[in-house]
């Protein structure tokens, strides 16, 4: 399936769900497995049909926007930052979940402390090497399980799963965790990302089933 057909199909699915009256839950579920999800032991691959091959010698991560100290990291400099390993569950909006995923990388809070966002910064906008983008409220990024992951299960994050580095935000649907991350920008006003402008929910909380706008 071409990139264009894949995107059109996903957008059509969101439109169909909305036409059928799909509504997010007013009260969040409390089970470990969010409503409407099924467990898998595999790890399906979903992307825009483009898996950029980024040599580590050319990889950079820019953290900018409303910050006191914008930074550009090389691969070597980024991996010299303090590393954390976190065990979390992974929830895809296409209705599958995977328990106990072990991710290693740099905590978002570490980047937050380094760049020192200005008081007016309320949102974070992620962009990727494949042209993808997504938006997340800053307070959702400050949980202790949010990180820029470079390893999965102790091994480098594979290209098909968003390597060399991807965003992990376990408490939101996985589309909010950008693969192939290139830029992290702090904003005062919200800016809709790739799927958000195509009918997907702006918040993306799995326990509220915030799948579609």
Image (cartoon, rainbow, N blue to C red):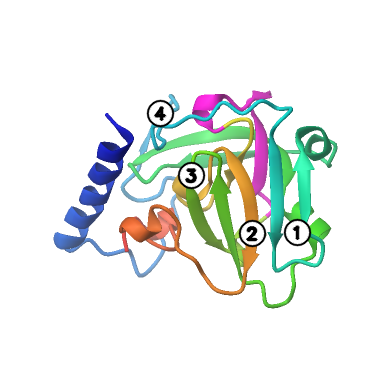
Q: CA distance from mark 2 to mark 1?
A: 11 Å
Of helix, strand and loop, which one carries label 4? loop
The label nearer to you, 2 versus 1, is: 2
Q: Would residue 165 appear left or right of 83 to someone viewing this image?
A: left
* Nearer mark to the viewer, of 3 and 1: 3
Vertical placement of residue 160 versus 191, above or below: above
Q: Which mark is residue 185?
A: 2
Q: What is the crowding at mark 3: few (fewer than 14 residues within 10 Å), some, or many (at least 20)?
A: few
Which residue is identified by label 4? 44
* Residue located at (41% from left, 42% from top): 92
On screen, residue 74 versus residue 41, left or right, reads: right
Instruction: For marks 2 and 4, give the CA distance.
Output: 28 Å
Q: Which residues are magenta?
A: 144-162
* The magenta stretch spans residue 122: no
Which residue reaches farthest left? 20
Upstream in the sequence, badge 2 or badge 3? 3
The extreme top residue here reads 155
Residue assigned mark 1: 112
The image's mark for residue 131 is: 3
Which of the marked residues, 2 or 4, is nearer the chain's N terminus?
A: 4
Disc 1 secondary structure class: helix
Position of the C terminus, as image quadrant, is bottom left
Residue 145 sits inside the magenta stretch:
yes
Q: Are marks 2 and 4 in contact (CB under 8 Å)?
A: no
Q: Quick check: can you spot residue 169?
A: no
């Amino acid at each position: 399936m071409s990139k264009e057909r894949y995107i059109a199909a996903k957008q059509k699915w969101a439109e169909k769900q909305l036409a059928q009256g799909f509504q997010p839950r007013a009260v969040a579920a409390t089970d470990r497995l969010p409503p409407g999800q099924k467990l898998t032991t595999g790890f399906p691959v979903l992307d825009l049909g483009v898996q950029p091959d980024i040599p580590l010698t050319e990889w950079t991560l820019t953290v900018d926007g409303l910050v006191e100290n914008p930074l550009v990291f090389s691969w070597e400099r980024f991996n010299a930052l303090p590393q954390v390993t976190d065990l979390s569950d992974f929830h895809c909006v296409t209705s599958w979940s995977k328990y106990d995923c072990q991710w290693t990388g740099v905590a978002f809070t570490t980047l937050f402390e380094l760049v020192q966002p200005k008081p007016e910064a309320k949102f974070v906008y992620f962009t990727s090497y494949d042209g993808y983008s997504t938006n997340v409220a800053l307070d959702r990024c400050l949980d202790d399980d949010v990180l820029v992951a470079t390893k999965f299960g102790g091994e480098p994050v594979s290209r098909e799963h968003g390597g060399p580095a991807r965003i992990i935000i376990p408490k939101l649907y996985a589309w909010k965790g950008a693969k192939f991350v290139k830029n992290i920008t702090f904003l005062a006003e919200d800016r809709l990302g790739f799927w958000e402008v195509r009918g997907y929910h702006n918040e993306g909380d799995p326990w509220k089933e915030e799948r579609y706008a």
